[in-house]
Structures are given as C-alpha cells and as structure tokens.
Image (cartoon, rainbow, N blue to C red):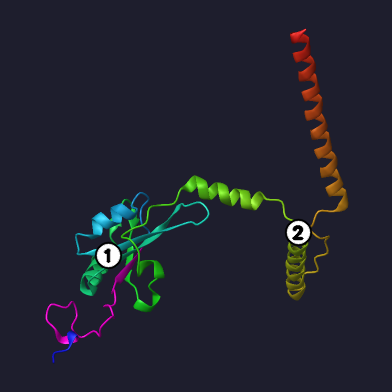
C-alpha cells in the first residue's frame, strides 16, 4: 500500500499529513530611506530583483510619522542577498541607503505573516489620542506616584553631583504651596472674567430685544 505522503502531486511529499510547509522569508533591513518612499513604492522598486513577499515600514505609534527605515522580505535567499548587496550604499534623493540581510532569528513577527503591506495609520487620529492621554488629569494615587518618581530622580542627581565633589544645595523642583496658590488665584480670576463677560453679553442681548 502506498502512503499518502509519497503520492505524486502533493506540494511537499516529505512532510507528514496535516503539517504545512514553513513559510520562509528572507528579510532585508533598509535604513536612511528618503521621505515618500513608503510601502507601495518599496514594493514596486524591489520587485525588480525578484518576488517580494512582504514590506513593513517603521512608523511612530504616537503620531504615525515615517521613521526612515523599513523591512523588505523576499521569497528567495539568493535574491535577498543580491538586493542587499546592490542597494547598500546606493544614493537615492540625497540619502545613502544602508541595506543588510537580517539573521532569521532577528526577523520581527510582523514579517512572518500577514498581507503584503499594511496601510499607514491615520496620523491625526493617533496624534489626537496621544495628546488626550497626555493631557488627561491624573487621579490622586497616580499623581502621588509621579511625585515620588520625580523626587527620587532629583535626589539621585544630587547624590551623583556630591560623588563628583560638587555640593549643590537647592530646593526641590516640585511646585511649592505658594506657586500652587498663585496658579489657583490666576485660574479663579480667569473664570471670573469669563462670567463677567457672559453677564455683559446677556444684558446687551436683553437691551436689543427690548
């Protein structure tokens, strides 16, 4: 009886039943890429060397901005080596490219599976989300923790200066009670001005209606 593993016409007769062939990819990391040379442009350019499986462009998670480097994955190792050797040091729009073939153990997960290339994130959405996160008022517990970290960092700097023989005596950089009260008074004055303006505008509207 002939086993199913040895039957002709199978993609890989050496593999056991139910096991798929490993998706091999040979990745070239490219640095110092000129602005505007994004996913689609990289894909179209590097297909001249051979079959390109995936392209990933590094972008900031906070803003979505282009970082200037990317990964290009080839199906064939020899093609990837030729592409890296040919394009390394290549001058493109006043930018000298830096290309090298990555070690398989250092290839990121995003290059091992997924579509050919991922559409760039919506920059405004991410930037707005990050701004809201940073400007969000902290609760009492988080504020106390942040205060403790600032004080510890400040003390560490003073200890380093003392170790160098510099006796630097100064107060903590945290806002004092006077400063906080000044800010509070300023805020109250600003709120009062807004209320006065609203009252004046209401009176003017009443006169116009009368």
Residue 36 in picture, x, y percent from top left: 35, 49
| Nearer-the-camera pick, 19 or 69 | 19
- Given contact means CB atoms under 8 Å apart, are the residues at marks 2 and 1 in contact? no
Quarter of the image where one finds residue 15: bottom left
Secondary structure, mark 1, is: strand
Check residue 25 for magenta coloring: yes
Quarter of the image where one finds residue 203: top right
Image height of 118 relative to 149, above or below: above
What is the residue that sits farthest to the front in this orientation?
1
| Nearer-the-camera pick, 7 or 210 | 7
> Disc 2 marks which residue?
143
Check residue 34 for magenta coloring: no
- Residue 114 visible, this orientation: yes
- Residue 31 visible, this orientation: no
Residue at coordinates 83% horizontally, 37% vertically from top-left? Answer: 188
Residue at coordinates 32% horizontally, 66% vertically from top-left? Answer: 99
Q: Which residues are magenta?
A: 5-31
Residue at coordinates 13% horizontally, 77% vertically from top-left? Answer: 9
The reply, left or right, for residue 24 in relation to residue 61 is left
The reply, left or right, for residue 178 in relation to residue 87 is right
Secondary structure, mark 2, is: helix
Alpha-carbon neighbours of circle 1 within 10 Å: few (<14), some, or many (≥20)?
A: many
């Amino acid at each position: 009886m002939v086993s199913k593993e040895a039957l002709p016409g199978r993609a890989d007769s050496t593999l056991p039943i139910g096991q798929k062939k490993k998706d091999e990819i040979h990745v070239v990391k490219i640095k110092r890429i000129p602005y505007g040379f994004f996913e689609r442009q990289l894909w179209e350019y590097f297909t001249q060397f051979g079959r390109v499986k995936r392209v990933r462009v590094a972008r900031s998670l906070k803003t979505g901005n282009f970082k200037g480097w990317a990964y290009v994955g080839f199906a064939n190792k020899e093609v990837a080596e030729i592409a890296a050797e040919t394009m390394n040091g290549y001058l493109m729009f006043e930018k000298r490219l830096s290309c090298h073939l990555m070690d398989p153990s250092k290839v990121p997960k995003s290059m091992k599976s997924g579509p050919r290339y991922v559409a760039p994130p919506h920059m405004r959405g991410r930037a707005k989300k990050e701004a809201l996160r940073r400007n969000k008022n902290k609760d009492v517990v988080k504020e106390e923790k942040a205060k403790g970290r600032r004080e510890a960092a400040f003390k560490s700097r003073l200890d380093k200066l003392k170790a160098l023989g510099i006796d630097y005596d100064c107060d903590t950089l945290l806002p004092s009670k006077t400063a906080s009260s000044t800010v509070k008074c300023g805020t109250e004055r600003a709120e009062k001005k807004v209320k006065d303006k609203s009252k004046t505008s209401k009176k003017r509207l009443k006169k116009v209606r009368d």
